[in-house]
Amino acid sequence: MDPFEVRMHFLSLLRKLNASQQSIQKAASFAVKFFPPCGEDLWDCIVEECQKGSINSRINILYFLDSLCETCLLVKSSAHKSMRHDPAKHASSSSAANNNPSNNGLYVAFVTRDLAKIVDSVVPVGREGLPNLVSTKQILETWRSKRVIDPQKVEEVLNALAIRSIQPPPSPSANGSSQHSSHLSKNEIFKRIEEDRERHKRLRERRWVQPVTHNPSSNSQLMSFLPLTDTQDGEEELTIDIEFENEWETTSDWNEDDEEVVAEESELCFPAEGEGPMDLS
């Protein structure tokens, strides 16, 4: 297909997006396949549809971007593995990546660059954006915890959403026409409820998935043999380090409640003299 046909076909796929994984994966596979010749053009299509589509179609595009980023990281990891076994291919690919930095992460680089613009389109200011607010925060939290997008970049966008949520809504007179035009019909509301149910089910499933590793050379082995990494290592950071940092950041400081729990556990495990053994039944 020529670039015009690629663009038109991709726009058709974006406009048919829904909560089903089949439609999302079909669009993501098409975008990755035609990234080398038409990556910038396809990304412009995503941004345009996200800006002018309905409020329901915008959240569909955000979930599509979530799957697209995951697919891009998997493609990148498999490409690194193949280059390790072919030094000549590695040299040619490295020079190509230096000429075009976005090739390193495919569409992930575009998402990172335009993240604030995408979120502003998916969650517009006012009551119109409220249906997409919770789902958008969930996706951003997933990207931050799994290091799909630069955590600092995601933190800035989340802070902007938090500031916006505590600000008073705009007056109806100033934004009355846009609210009227964004009114959803009864069928659209029921469709949105069903799609949200499907999306939340998938989010619950993905909570148990390990963070995405950006280090394609890491294999399954004992942790004692894994190299030490730090957050500054970027792509070389291991999955186990990402998971540990997420747990460490959400753990509270040591306090009196912890001391009471330790004392109770000690009494159960090591009873005082004269007391019976701990009941293990």
Image (cartoon, grey):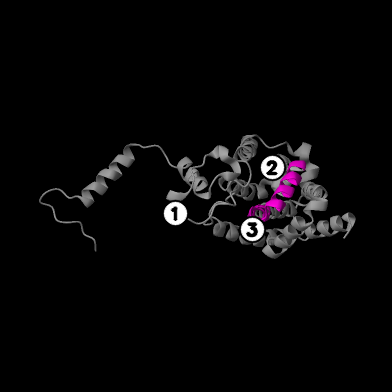
Label 2: state its secondary structure: helix
Mark 2 crowdedness (10 Å alpha carbons): few <14, some 14-19, many ≥20: some
| Residue 222 marker | 1
Q: Position of residue 137 (x, y in %)?
A: 61, 46
Q: Quadrant of the C terminus?
A: bottom left
Mark 1 crowdedness (10 Å alpha carbons): few <14, some 14-19, many ≥20: few
- Of badges 1 and 3, the one in the foreground is 1
Tell me if residue 5 is in the magenta stretch.
no
Tell me, yes or no, whether the two marked residues, 1 and 3, touch with CB atoms within 8 Å. no
Q: Amino acid at mark 3?
A: Asp
Q: Which residues are magenta?
A: 71-99
Identify the residue position indicated by label 3 in the image: 196
Identify the residue position indicated by label 2 in the image: 112
Q: Earlier in the sequence, mark 1 or mark 3?
A: 3
Label 1: state its secondary structure: loop
- On screen, residue 31 versus residue 230, left or right, reads right
Whole-angstrom CA distance, mark 1 to mark 3, is: 40 Å
